[in-house]
Image (cartoon, rainbow, N blue to C red):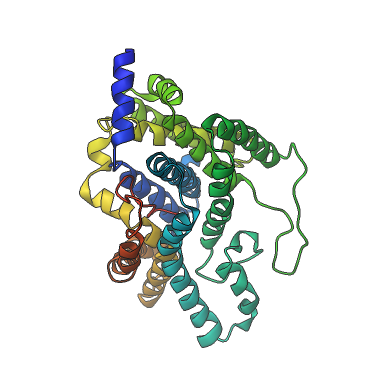
């Protein structure tokens, strides 16, 4: 690729206001999560390929994507106004994340604690409302996915401030790279685990690898934002077919990696995910464009945050309907599975149209051009 091609690609990237394939990527991420929590539809005597046990990595993919998007938004605001506003950042973040999150937590608490009288869950509520659920030993039923929202919000308490304290991009890279190395070294147990005072409901160890995935996404955003970094990534990942090849590589990695991904497997997987994100935004005409921007796929991606928050409600509906039909075990699981998927999407669509959209409209009323990059509808 010539220097002229690289210059044009960099200019196009910096001028792109909407990365059209990222809602499709969100659809893939939330599909992995849905698969992870789905009833087991396989017979006990069937050996399931390792790749089909990796649904939980959809959360890792969301982390990487979140780090990339949020950091890109901040860097572009910084370019436009000379610096970004932390107040505006938290305002946008609050309006996107908190209303629907608090609604789900509150409705769930009312049901389990108020209606069903299971008051043992009362002690857990502060952890959810303060975004500390990732430290809980257990979870209130239907709220198990909330730990990932806690990881993200903890990260974004510190990340914008760090960017302001390090105004030069190369300083940011010099801090981020060692931080990533430390996080994955800790994940591999090469460093002592950080601990907190343990309580009855509170973990003692600090879970760190989720922060590493977000940080890798943030580093990808910083590199793409610089002429030199973009040029390097363009030469490595700028081919139209790169995105398809990377998805195949990720599937192979899921299959051949050990069951426990802690340490180097997480590090490799998160970097492959980051490279996929880069390959989808570095050029709009990649080979997967039609599939990822197909309207039904893009719509599921657009409402994926709601699907993430509500999908255990959909699972509950599917299980209850299978039980009402008198089905048991494998038959019940196979009947509940499609009901679970459809219910999750329907509930999320209703939530998006009649609740989240109000706050999204408020979110757009800021000095930042919210259309510059897609809103983070797939957090978690």
Q: Residue furthest top?
A: 2
Q: Is residue 261 left or right of residue 249?
A: right
Q: Is residue 206 left or right of residue 356?
A: right
Q: Quadrant of the N terminus?
A: top left
| Residue drawn at point x = 49 percent, y = 76 percent | 106
Quadrant assignment, res 238: top left
In front of the other: 75 or 54: 75
In front of the other: 53 or 155: 155
Quadrant assignment, res 20: top left
Can residue 167 be spotted in the picture?
yes
Relative to 287, say whether 215 is above or below. Answer: below
Residue 26 in picture, x, y percent from top left = 37, 48
Residue 15 in picture, x, y percent from top left = 29, 35
Residue 98 in picture, x, y percent from top left = 46, 66
| Count of all numbered marks drawn on residues in the image | 0
| Residue drawn at point x = 57 percent, y = 35 percent | 172
Relative to 368, say whether 256 is above or below. Answer: above
In front of the other: 107 or 357: 357
Residue 231 in picture, x, y percent from top left = 40, 21
Can residue 255 be spotted in the picture?
no
């Amino acid at each position: 690729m010539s220097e002229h091609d690289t210059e044009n690609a960099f200019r196009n990237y910096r001028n792109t206001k909407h990365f059209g394939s990222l809602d499709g990527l969100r659809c893939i991420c939330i599909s992995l999560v849905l698969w992870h929590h789905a009833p087991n539809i396989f017979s006990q005597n069937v050996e399931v390929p390792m790749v089909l046990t990796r649904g939980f990595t959809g959360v890792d993919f969301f982390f990487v994507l979140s780090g990339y998007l949020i950091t890109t938004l901040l860097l572009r605001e910084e370019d436009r106004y000379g610096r970004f506003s932390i107040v505006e950042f938290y305002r946008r973040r609050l309006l996107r994340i908190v209303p629907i999150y608090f609604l789900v937590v509150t409705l769930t608490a009312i049901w389990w604690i108020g209606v069903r009288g299971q008051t043992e869950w009362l002690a857990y509520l502060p952890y959810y409302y303060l975004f500390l659920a990732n430290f809980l030993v257990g979870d209130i039923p239907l709220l198990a996915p909330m730990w990932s929202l806690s990881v993200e919000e903890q990260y974004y308490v510190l990340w914008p401030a760090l960017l302001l304290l390090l105004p030069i991009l190369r300083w940011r890279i010099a801090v981020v790279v060692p931080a990533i190395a430390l996080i994955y070294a800790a994940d591999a147990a090469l460093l002592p685990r950080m601990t907190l005072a343990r309580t009855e409901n509170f973990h003692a160890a600090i879970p760190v690898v989720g922060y590493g995935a977000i940080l890798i996404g943030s580093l990808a955003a910083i590199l793409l934002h610089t002429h030199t970094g973009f040029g390097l990534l363009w030469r490595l990942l700028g081919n139209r077919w790169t995105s398809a090849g990377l998805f195949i590589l990720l599937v192979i990695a899921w299959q051949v990696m050990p069951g426990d991904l802690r340490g180097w497997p997480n590090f490799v997987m998160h970097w492959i995910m980051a490279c996929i994100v880069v390959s989808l935004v570095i050029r709009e005409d990649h080979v997967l464009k039609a599939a990822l921007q197909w309207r039904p796929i893009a719509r599921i991606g657009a409402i994926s945050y709601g699907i993430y928050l509500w999908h255990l409600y959909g699972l509950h509906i599917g299980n209850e309907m299978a039980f009402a039909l008198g089905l048991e075990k494998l038959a019940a699981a196979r009947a509940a599975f499609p009901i679970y998927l459809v219910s999750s999407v329907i509930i999320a669509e209703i939530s998006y149209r009649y609740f989240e959209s109000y706050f999204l409209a408020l979110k757009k009323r800021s000095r930042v051009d919210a259309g510059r990059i897609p809103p983070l509808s797939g957090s978690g």
